[in-house]
């Protein structure tokens, strides 16, 4: 029980250090990794080797993948490709179905682009279309916000789910498959919330009803070209996972070997990077420089990579402390709590400190050594655990979350309206996702 108490104190420390002391999550996680190992009575040399091994092993597996995903997202955003996708989606759904269109485009764009950036990028289009169609801006904003959130927390190559897959050593293809299944349900729940609940919130109009919708720049890439850097890596990674099934659906010859190579996450995402280089009308050396688009993407990814490494270090210390046996003995009488535990932990950390990415990485580090005791150490189970963590990392977005302020300020919401729209919406969406994971687990685990 001493280890369980120490684990609880460790979570409290991470949350308190990042929220109250404004400490960088990397520093908080490294401190708690050393602290847990020392106070758990581990030999000091084992504490050091666990931290080094956990940090290096995690970064070695997932670092380049996170960086490549960041580059794809930056090029998609700055080239105008994301805006082009939004315009095309509206052409399919029609302007009277703006909440549905914005949910769908947010769902696609947030796979490589951070949800904060996606909302800022599409907010002008969202507001203009809401005015033109005489629809509730709150409903349209909720649709966009929750569509972005669905894939941001559950579908690689978004950095959070990527990092969790690395820490848990989950098959990335299976994470993508189950993440897409669950996130579709979550996005649908978000859209229903937008049209049934958020539409009843009245936001003071900040522009004329006939305000024109700004046209997409002529230099923006086509819809197909914009989709390719997102979809091709996902297809390759999923194909590689399918090729590895015991039934060997693609045989065991050269084609299977080729799929095994190009479907490796590092290779698939680097292919996506080169496709992203085709998005600008004219690629120049400045874009590829340390001060250009690539340089900015590297800066954006660096923080995520070091936090991911620190989460891996903490997870390795927990693993080597023997806490998994303690958890296993405690939960033997509650076999069905297993798949809910990652969701509950992630939701608690997310609600307390605000960052979905930090919540995902911290929770992955916490539950990684516990998976065998929970009966969740199979390949499908690990993938569902990653998705369950992502579902928890939605619950809930409120005043300590930067995304909450992006959504409310760009949509002209008051604080109370933000709680009614963004906070309640993320609660509904996250719970819908968690329930979907649980239902799936009843049939596949």
Image: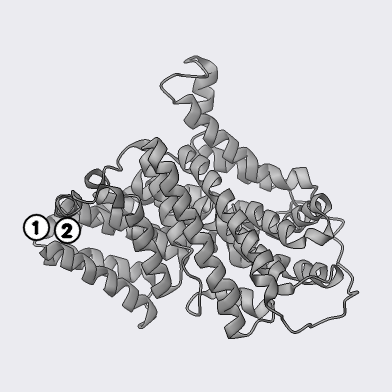
**For residue 313, side relative to residue 391 (left or right):** left
Q: Secondary structure at mark 2?
A: helix
Picture quadrant of residue 255: top right
Q: Quadrant of the C terminus?
A: top left
Count of number-bearing discs: 2
Q: Nearer the viewer, residue 440 or 126?
A: 440
Which residue occupies 56% across, 56% down?
A: 150
141 vs 87: above or below: below
Q: Which mark is residue 135?
A: none
Q: From where the camera sits, is residue 84 visible? A: yes
Q: From where the camera sits, is residue 281 visible? A: no
Q: Secondary structure at mark 1?
A: loop
Give the labeled residue for mark 1.
43
Q: Position of residue 174 (x, y in %)?
A: 46, 38
C-alpha span from label 1 to label 2 = 6 Å
Q: Nearer the viewer, residue 332 or 57?
A: 332
Which residue occupies 28% across, 73% down?
A: 12
Q: Are marks 1 and 2 in contact (CB under 8 Å)?
A: yes
Q: Position of residue 144 (x, y in %)?
A: 67, 63
Q: Position of residue 367 (x, y in %)?
A: 29, 54
Give the labeled residue for mark 2.
47
Which residue occupies 79% across, 50% down?
A: 221
């Amino acid at each position: 029980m001493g280890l369980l108490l120490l684990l609880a104190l460790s979570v409290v420390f991470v949350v308190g250090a990042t929220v109250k002391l404004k400490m960088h999550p990397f520093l908080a996680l490294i401190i708690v990794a050393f602290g847990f190992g020392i106070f758990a009575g581990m030999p000091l040399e084992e504490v050091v080797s666990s931290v080094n091994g956990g940090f290096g092993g995690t970064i070695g597996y997932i670092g380049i993948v996170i960086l490549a995903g960041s580059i794809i997202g930056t090029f998609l955003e700055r080239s105008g490709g994301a805006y082009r996708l939004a315009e095309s989606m509206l052409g399919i759904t029609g302007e009277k179905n703006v909440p549905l269109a914005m949910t769908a485009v947010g769902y696609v764009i947030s796979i490589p682009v951070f949800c904060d950036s996606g909302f800022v990028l599409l907010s002008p289009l969202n507001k203009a279309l809401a005015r033109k169609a005489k629809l509730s801006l709150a409903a349209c904003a909720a649709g966009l916000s929750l569509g972005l959130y669905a894939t941001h927390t559950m579908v690689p190559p978004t950095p959070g789910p990527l990092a969790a897959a690395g820490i848990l050593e989950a098959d990335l293809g299976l994470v993508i498959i189950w993440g897409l299944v669950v996130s579709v349900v979550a996005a649908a729940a978000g859209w229903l919330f937008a049209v049934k609940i958020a539409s009843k919130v009245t936001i003071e109009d900040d522009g004329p009803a006939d305000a024109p919708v700004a046209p997409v720049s002529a230099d923006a890439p086509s819809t197909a070209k914009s989709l390719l850097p997102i979809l091709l890596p996902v297809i390759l990674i999923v194909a590689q996972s399918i090729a590895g099934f015991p039934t060997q659906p693609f045989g065991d010859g050269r084609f299977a070997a080729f799929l095994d190579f190009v479907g490796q996450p590092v290779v698939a995402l680097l292919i996506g990077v080169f496709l992203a280089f085709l998005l600008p009308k004219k690629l120049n050396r400045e874009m590829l420089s340390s001060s250009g688009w690539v340089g900015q993407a590297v800066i954006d990814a660096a923080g995520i990579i070091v936090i991911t490494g620190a989460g891996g270090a903490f997870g390795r210390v927990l693993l080597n402390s023997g806490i998994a046996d303690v958890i296993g003995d405690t939960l033997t009488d509650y076999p069905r709590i297993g798949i809910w535990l990652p969701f509950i932990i992630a939701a608690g950390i997310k609600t307390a400190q605000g960052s979905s990415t930090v919540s995902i990485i911290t929770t992955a580090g916490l539950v990684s050594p516990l998976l065998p005791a929970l009966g969740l150490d199979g390949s499908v189970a690990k993938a569902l655990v990653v998705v369950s963590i992502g579902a928890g990392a939605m619950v809930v977005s409120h005043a300590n979350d930067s995304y909450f302020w992006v959504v409310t300020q760009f949509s002209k919401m008051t604080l109370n309206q933000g709680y009614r729209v963004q906070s309640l919406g993320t609660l509904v969406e996250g719970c819908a996702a968690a329930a979907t994971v649980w239902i799936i687990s009843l049939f596949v685990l």
